[in-house]
């Protein structure tokens, strides 16, 4: 009887030892390690600017109709037009030094006013940035916009603009505006037009 009790105690201890052994094995096998990753995000900058004097001239923002750049058409012809006369005016656009993305420029709208707005047609060409805005340059230029009068706009090709590097502005693109007087041009009357171009980052 005493021998059976002793044997049960030994078996109980062995069983306990086995449980402890299994528990120890699980604890030793439970190695773990972690990796974490984080990301920071900042928006780039984007701004289009223009100049009326030259590719390396004074650029500024003209982002409202009220602040539109005054194009300098051929003088004195533009102030004394007769039927079939043609006048030219250059305008350069570029992405400013803070811009971080290239863009595509397209003609969007024209707002023409005055009695002779219906009697003046126009075309806008992209020409070489250093070229003179005249009949020779537009012959090899790319048509960006046109209209049978100063109240209509048909968009042509878009203009690619590149961002600058090392805090420089992007390369300029020259738009050459060509306005032609129609046969019905009225004497002594005036007209004006405001074109809108939009650059979209890509």
Image: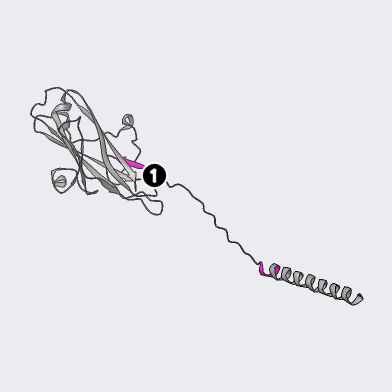
Q: Left or right: 105 with respect to 2? A: left
Q: Residue at x 84, y 75 (%)?
A: 10
Dominant SS of magenta comes to loop
Measured along the vertical axis of the image, is residue 6 above or below residue 164? below
* Image location (x, y in percent) of residue 202: 34, 48
Q: Quadrant of the N terminus?
A: bottom right
* Image location (x, y in percent) of residue 30: 66, 66
Q: Left or right: 165 with respect to 148? A: right
Q: Which residue is drawn at 13% across and 43% down?
A: 135
What residue is pinned by disc 1?
46
Measured along the vertical axis of the image, is residue 134 above or below residue 10? above
* Image location (x, y in percent) of residue 190: 18, 24
| Residue 46 inside the magenta-drawn segment | yes
Residue located farthest toward the right when viewing the structure as drawn: 2
Can residue 58 be seen here?
no
* Image location (x, y in percent) of residue 81: 13, 29
For the record, the magenta segment spans 27-53
Q: Residue at x 40, y 54 (%)?
A: 166
Decide which of 64, 53 is in the foreground and name it: 64
Decide which of 152, 4 is in the foreground and name it: 4
Callout 1: SS: loop
| Residue 117 inside the magenta-drawn segment | no
Q: Quadrant of residue 76?
A: top left
């Amino acid at each position: 009887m005493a021998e059976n009790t002793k044997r049960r105690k030994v078996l109980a201890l062995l069983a306990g030892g086995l449980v402890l052994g299994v528990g120890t094995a699980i604890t030793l096998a439970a190695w773990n390690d972690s990796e974490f990753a984080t990301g920071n995000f900042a928006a780039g900058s984007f701004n289009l600017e223009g100049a009326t004097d030259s590719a390396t001239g004074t650029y500024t923002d003209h982002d409202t109709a009220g602040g539109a750049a005054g194009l300098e058409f051929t003088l004195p012809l533009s102030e004394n037009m007769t039927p079939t006369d043609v006048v030219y005016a250059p305008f350069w656009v570029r992405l400013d030094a803070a811009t971080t993305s290239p863009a595509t420029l397209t003609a969007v709208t024209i707002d023409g006013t005055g009695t002779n707005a219906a009697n003046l047609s126009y075309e806008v060409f992209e020409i070489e940035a250093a070229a003179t805005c005249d009949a020779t340059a537009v012959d090899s230029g790319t048509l960006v916009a046109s209209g049978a009068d100063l109240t209509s706009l048909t968009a042509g090709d878009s203009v690619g603009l590149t961002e600058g590097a090392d805090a420089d502005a992007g390369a300029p693109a020259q738009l050459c505006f060509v306005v032609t007087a129609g046969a019905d041009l009225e004497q002594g009357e005036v007209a004006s037009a405001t074109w809108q171009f939009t650059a979209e980052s890509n």
